[in-house]
Image (cartoon, helix red, strand yellow):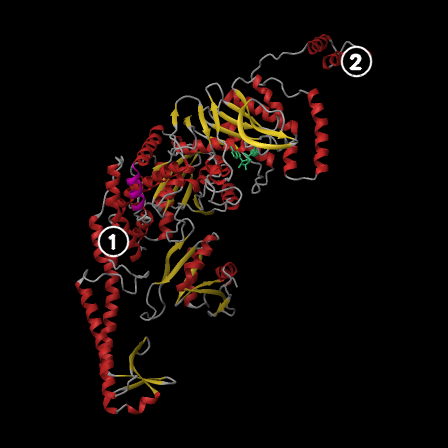
Amino acid sequence: MLRSDVDRTKISPMMLQYLEIKEKYEDTIIFFRLGDFYEMFFEDALLASRELELTLTGKNCGLEERVPMCGIPYHAYKSYLDKLIDKGYKVAICEQLTDPKETKGMVERDVIQVVTCGTRLDDSLNSKDYNYIGNIYDFEYCYGVSFIDVSTGYTYGVILDYDKDSLLKEILTYNLKEVIVNSKIDRSIVTLLREQYNILVTIRDTIYEQDDYHYLTEDISDIRIKTTIHHLISYLLETKKGSLSHLQKVELIDHKKHLLFDTHTKKNLELIETIRNRDRTYSLLWLLDKTKTAMGGRLLKSNIENPLTDVQEINRRYDIIEILLTEFILKDELREELDKVYDLERLCSRISYGNSNARDMIQLKNSLIALPNIKRILEEIHYDKKIEVFDDLVELLEKAINLDSPIGLHEGGLIKEGYNSELDELKNIRKNSKDFILELENEEKERTGIKNLKVGFNKVFGYYIEVSKGNIKDIKDEYGWIRKQTLTNAERYITPLLKEKEDIILGAEEKIINLEYKLFTDVREIAKGYVSRIQKVSKVIAEVDMLLSFALVSEENNYIRPILTDEHMIKIVEGRHPVVEKVNKKEYVANDIIMGNDTDILLITGPNMAGKSTYMRQLAITVIMAQIGCFVPCKSCIIPIFDQIFTRIGASDDLVSGDSTFMVEMKEANIAISHATMNSLILFDELGRGTATYDGMSLAQAILEYIHDKIKAKTLFSTHYHELTTLANQLSHLKNVHVSAIEEEGKITFLHKVKNGAIDKSYGIHVAALAQLPKDLIERADEILGVYEHKSIKQETFTQTSLFLDIDSPKNVEQDKVYEKLEEINPLEITPMDALNILYELKQEIKKGTH
Ligand code: ADP
Ligand code: MG
């Protein structure tokens, strides 16, 4: 039965309550609290039973048919909730707001929070990653986009041109899982986000209008940014239903401040994860991450994804690394102190939002205790940012919070003795009464002579005296015991005195729990007042942690400080690929990358497996490391600041969009060519190999000419087409290099050494032999190759001049003669016979030329 089939006049009041709540949360699964369970009904029940493999049952609620239902125990709801959220659903938690025991009629219920993948605050989040939720506000002439990480409070905004591609790029850069859009947006964008990128999209127009969160945008005059942020805030407030006062002021995203590259490049260069296993291990992030804190780890990742372009800031980072490398005692000490710091950013968020427990408070305290030492070390190394310490808050937490507090807040055990006298008194009363009962056990044993008599407690009967069956005969009426419960082997009794003490204990117990909860939330409220100051400290700690990580990695692997130049030149001596060198068992062969003012393009040839792709990646990774402020893997390095990196590496088909390899290649080439500037870095790895040889070769040449003449970006271009190497004769800023290999007795050894000049052989067949293809087959391939090589000498078709340069090419005499003759002919005046004769003559001329 579906919800729409329900006859509301007949349905039970509770189900009516459910329907009314569900109407407000149409696109959300409702966890409806019924006693010890969260129940789901109707379509939600069908869906959840399928997704969570729960048994589908039914509930009678006044209708002829039972309503589909399934449920989960409330104390174990978390794993079910996480599963649904991971699958991209939203879940609304609907609680009982009044105590069923004390309520006459129906228990009040309402949604206390909506959980979505973009708004989580709990510990299911990856500590090494931000969790952004974003929005797109379509202004019909531009897009407003903002991102908020609710778990740390970071808030960003940007206004983008009215262009779908740049919008998509922005959304993908921040790894969003959830996006809110206003209804003006083109639905094709919504479909794309949902279907191709698995992003949870909610369409809604409400904009936040109260004052509480206006501080976020108070420094920003652009009204569009305000609208965009308030659009997202309104959604957050509606789902979280709690205080979001930890959100930090909006930072405007300025693309000029970052080295830009798209998600393909991020993937191709294996910055965050490897291509093959999509695993963090063996990525650049893996290599560089020696951070001790969660904040440092997150900052490092976001830096790798968004390196800097500000020379001053980058040099500042180098300076700090240099100091850290000389101060090795302080460096180790700093590392030890950072190890004591917990995830302050997320602790702050939970404290503000009001869902932190006593263990969070202990983590906060332990983190804050490390600050004075960190502060001292930073001063000693003349770090240019200062941190504040929080002795008073530490003192409060130290005094108040019990060190072995439970996770829950409603079972007592949170507050230390000596913090609050009323609490101590209640605990005293409880203890005295408990002691009294222990004593009572002994007294009764003596009085009755029953040795195995004992006093026990259970939830139903409270305190009781238990006597085994064999001893019942010794119980006398004068004891005044009242029989309460019969077990197989024993009887249980209560006495008026026992009950009197029990009342005192239980009364005290309840008061203690309530008082402890109140005292705890008071402390939390005080801590909340410190949040924005602690957030500032966290930022500095994150940066210090990241730079310390750079220092450690640089030291361990012999990286050096790059020199950043204003000139259009690259001079890397004995450069290495940092991950390959780390992972490969073989010795890494270091290579220079020299591209002076007069060299914009390196055309790289060499056999398969020689190391062309590695060489190209090595440059890009070095540039990225340099621009996040880390040292780089080489002997010496002079490089300019790059604005963008474009890559076409590897031949992976884009399975999602269904494009062929060649189409992907051409699209990526087009993106590079249309957006690159002179200050960009372009890596084209065997561009054009996805199509027929001549097509590919022609396109490759045309692209090279275009980059050479129009863009002048520093470009590494590897190719199989040896014919292209003659381009160096015409394109003055193109240089040939090759990766060498030696061939001995038909076998090939890779030296991985990059040398000047072109290579004339591709050794493809040798590589095939290495791969142990059948011997006959290899021989046959060699034979065929012979034929092709013979032909290609005759057909030097592909060494024409640049289309864009218009330099006169040296034509040969025969060609000139043919040309002259053709000029003379007027086809309208000659007979077919004449035409045939002329054609014969022309052919003779050409033949002369080719022999
Ligand atoms: P190509 O692109 O020329 O086919 P790759 O760059 O993919 O070659 O490199 C092939 C293999 O050689 C890789 O497994 C890599 O580990 C190794 N390699 C590449 N360059 C070097 C180098 N400079 N030193 C040592 N090993 C290298
Ligand atoms: Mg390659």
Magenta-drawn segment: 327-336
- SS category of the residue bearing label 2: helix
Question: Where is ligand 2, by quadrant?
Answer: top right
Residue behind mark 1: 525
Q: Quadrant of the C terminus?
A: top right
Q: Is residue 166 visible?
A: yes
Q: Residue at x 29, y 51 (%)?
A: 352
The residue that disc 2 covers is 840
Q: Within 8 Å of ligand 1, the CB of disc 2?
A: no
Q: Is residue 640 above or below residue 28?
A: above
Mark 1 neighbour class, 10 Å CA radius: few under 14, some 14 to 19, many 20 or more? some
What's under tag 1, amino acid-wise? Glu
Q: Is residue 629 magenta?
A: no
Q: Is residue 528 left or right of residue 261?
A: left
**In front: mark 2 or mark 1?**
2
Question: What residue is rendered at 28% in x and 90% in y?
Answer: 475
How far apart in space, not on screen, are marks 2 and 1 (Cα)?
100 Å
